[in-house]
Amino acid sequence: MAIKQPAVYILASKKNGTLYTGVTSDLVKRIWEHKNDLIKGFTKRYKVHNLVWYELHDNMDAAIEREKNMKEWKRAWKVRLFEKDNPNGNDLYDSII
């Protein structure tokens, strides 16, 4: 059985494209679902599939709180956050599987 690891993540459609912030207890599975359009809604509609940033948390409550706060952020703050470690907005999915 896989160990659950709460995480907050940012997806992007492309460089300077649409952003999506989410939370999950299984990052690899959740990003795979986004990439394969198995999740109806925003990310499927706008083709937001590239994992550009993620942050692991000790518990789900902390991850949910962080995601709620980040949903209130200005776009520029989110871009600054992921560009600090991922300046080209590369898809990080292969590095987590």
Image (cartoon, rainbow, N blue to C red):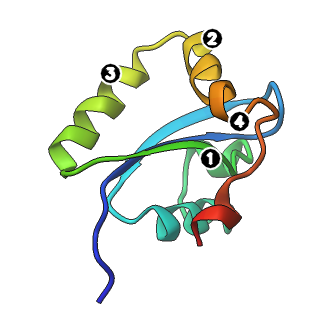
| Residue positioned 63% across, 17% down in the render | 80
Residue at figure coordinates x 54%, y 56% from the top left: 40
Residue at image x 71%, y 36%? Answer: 86
Q: Is residue 48 left or right of residue 63?
A: right
- Residue that badge 3 annotates: 69
- Residue identified by numbered label 4: 86
Mark identifier at residue 76: 2
Q: Do labels 1 and 3 touch, CB within 8 Å?
A: no
Between residue 58 and residue 15, name the one nearer to us: 58
**Quadrant containing the N terminus in the rendered view:** bottom left
Q: CA distance from mark 1 to mark 2?
A: 19 Å
Query: Closer to the camera, 57 or 25?
Result: 57
Q: Is residue 75 left or right of 16 when viewed as pictured?
A: left
Q: Disc 4 and disc 1: Cα gap in Å?
A: 21 Å
Three-letter code, disc 1: Thr
Q: Earlier in the sequence, mark 1 or mark 3?
A: 1
Q: Closer to the observer: label 4 or label 1?
A: 4
**Amino acid tagged 2:** Ala
Where disc 3 sits, the SS reads helix
Mark 2 or mark 4: whose residue is earlier in sequence: 2
Residue 87 horizontal/vertical position (percent):
76, 29
Residue at image mark 1: 43
Indicate the position of residue 30 as horizontal and vertical percent values: 49, 63
Q: Amino acid at mark 3?
A: Asn
Q: Quadrant of the C terminus?
A: bottom right
Quick one: label 3 or label 4, which is nearer the N terminus? Answer: 3
Mark nearer the N terminus (4 vs 1): 1
Report whether 14 appears left or right of 19: right
**Marked residue nearer the N-terminal end (1 or 2):** 1
Question: Would you say the residues marked 1 and 2 are in contact, meaning their CB atoms lie under 8 Å apart?
Answer: no
Q: Dot 2 lies on which element?
A: helix
